[in-house]
Amino acid sequence: MNDILFGIGAIILGIAASWGLYWVLDFLVRLLPAKTQERLRAFSFLLPALVLLILISVIPFFQTIVWSFFDKKGKEFIGVENYVTLFTDNNFLGILLNNFLWVAFVPVITVGFGLIAANLSNNVGPRREKIMKSLIFMPMSISFVSAATIWAYFYESPPPGRPQIGLLNAIVEAFGGEAQSWLLMDAGRLNSFFLMIVVVWLNAGFSMVMLSSAIKAVPEETIEAARIDGAGPFKIFTGVIIPQIRGTIMSVFITTVIGVMKIFDIVLAMTGGNFNTSVLGYEYYRLFFVESNIGGSAAVVSILCILIAPLMWLQIRTAKFQEEIR
């Protein structure tokens, strides 16, 4: 009960404090000349959010880069030694390979599945469309850790002598096969692909909804013109619809890539980074929280930021392009 009262009090205090802050800023702006007021009014409302952004994002970002040049305790300057250590470590190179595999497969499969699901669901009746989209979108309502727990039971392989509870192994045995330890199969990094399935399952709904909206926005005249010219459903989809929703496809693809680059929850909950399944996000967690290695973990985060930065720039450019063609 005390926690509930504390939460309610925090909400009320936060609203009151926010209102008071903006009232004070607006009052100060009103004291200025009329021309100056017009110039500063919008900035005064953006100022609190801008200050908060700088405090919780910009300053920690540069602090992290600085720490990457310091030792394990973050006190002694050691130059680029942390980066040299990482890039000469075979384990870290394997982690980079894992991230590359995640980026190479998950976004393509997610967008591809979302595109197919969006097109199929748009071509059925309204009632069936709602049911179909609800079922595909439903996984997005649960957290990554919850999804990892569900799929961990799906891949479960109990020790000999214990009852089989893993659905995948039960299916394999039903067809005369042998049960496997799916998440321990690091040959060809097959277990990493089993983890990727979970992320595709989670993100397919987002991809489907975004692409479905884009497909519905395609002018019906262009589709009718293609039909008059004798184009079939597949030709219309690939030659008429996809070119017109290319911007949305690119936007969904980049969003998925950025999310995949930061993947952490699935790996932590399902394998703990063992059996060659670790990624950059988990490696940062391991170095900082397990080994208390400030410099090394900061170097990992810096590398991750360097890899994500071009994707964010491309995402912004894609968004601007979409706005221009509307």
Image (tube, rainbow, N blue to C red):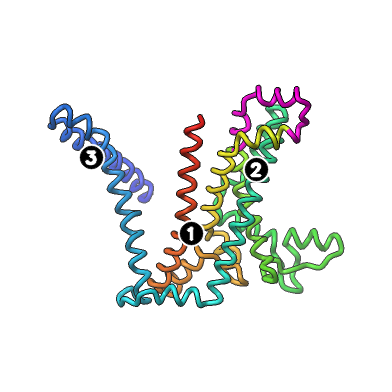
Name the quadrant containing residue 128: top right
Q: Is residue 229 left or right of residue 147?
A: right
Label 2 is placed on what type of residue? Gly
Q: Which residue is mark 2?
A: 114
Label 3 or label 1, whichever comes before in sequence order: 3
Give the residues drawn in magenta, as a range.
Answer: 211-235
Q: Is residue 173 left or right of residue 220?
A: right
Q: Is residue 311 above or below residue 225?
A: below
Name the quadrant containing residue 151: bottom right
Q: CA distance from mark 2 to mark 1?
A: 25 Å
Q: Which residue is mark 3?
A: 21
The mark total stands at 3
Q: Is residue 296 above or below residue 12?
A: below
Q: Which residue is mark 1?
A: 307
The reply to whether discs 2 and 3 touch (Cβ–Cβ < 8 Å) is: no
Secondary element at tag 2: helix
Q: Is residue 257 left or right of residue 42?
A: right
Q: Is residue 310 above or below residue 66?
A: above
Instruction: Name the foreground residue: 110 vs 25.
Output: 110
Between disc 2 and disc 3, the foreground one is 2
Label 3 is placed on what type of residue? Leu
Return the residue found at the far right.
176
Instruction: Name the foreground residue: 73 vs 136.
Output: 73
Label 1 is placed on what type of residue? Leu
Instruction: Name the foreground residue: 49 vs 182.
Output: 49
Q: Position of residue 102 (x, y in %)?
A: 60, 59
Label 2 or label 1, whichever comes before in sequence order: 2
Q: CA distance from mark 2 to mark 3?
A: 44 Å
